[in-house]
Image (cartoon, rainbow, N blue to C red):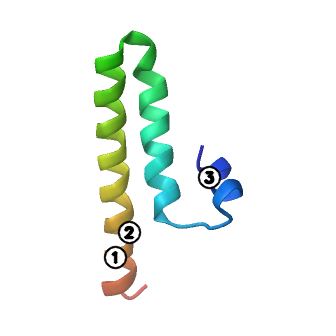
C-alpha cells in the first residue's frame, strides 16, 4: 500500500505510511465486519503515525 501511495502522490513521506497503516489494518480485519474493520483501521493508522513520529524524533535528537 505504501508503494502505491508513493506512486500516486509522487512523494515519499510519513503520510504514505499512515495511509498504508489505515488501509492494511482495515483490509486485514474488514472481512470480519464493518465496525471491527473501521476500528482496526483507526488503530493501525494511529500506531503507524506514532512510529513515524518517533522515527522523526530519533533522527532529529539522536546522533547516529
Residue 3: x percent and y percent? 66, 51
Image quarter of the N terminus: top right
Please say if 39 is above or below 49: above
Residue 10 at what x, y percent from top left? 68, 65
Q: In this view, does 57 lie above or below 44?
A: below
| Label 2 sits on residue | 55
Q: Residue 49 placed where, x, y %?
A: 35, 56
Residue at (63% x, 67% y) in the render: 11
User: In the figure, 56 relative to 60: above or below?
Assistant: above
Q: Which residue matches tag 3?
A: 5
| Marking on residue 44 | none
Label 2 to label 3: alpha-carbon separation: 19 Å
| Residue 60 lies in quadrant | bottom left
Disc 2 versus disc 3: nearer the observer: 3
- Residue 47's place in the image compared with 11, above or below, is above
Confirm or deny contact between disc 1 and disc 2 (CB under 8 A).
yes
State yes or no: discs 1 and 3 in contact (Cβ < 8 Å).
no
Residue placed under numbered mark 1 in the picture: 58
Disc 1 is placed on an element classified as helix
Amino acid at each position: 500500500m505504501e508503494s502505491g501511495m508513493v506512486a500516486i502522490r509522487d512523494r515519499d513521506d510519513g503520510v504514505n505510511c499512515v495511509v498504508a497503516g489505515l488501509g492494511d489494518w482495515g483490509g486485514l480485519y474488514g472481512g470480519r465486519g464493518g465496525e471491527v474493520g473501521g476500528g482496526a483501521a483507526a488503530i493501525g493508522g494511529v500506531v503507524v503515525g506514532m512510529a513515524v513520529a518517533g522515527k522523526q524524533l530519533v533522527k532529529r535528537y539522536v546522533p547516529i
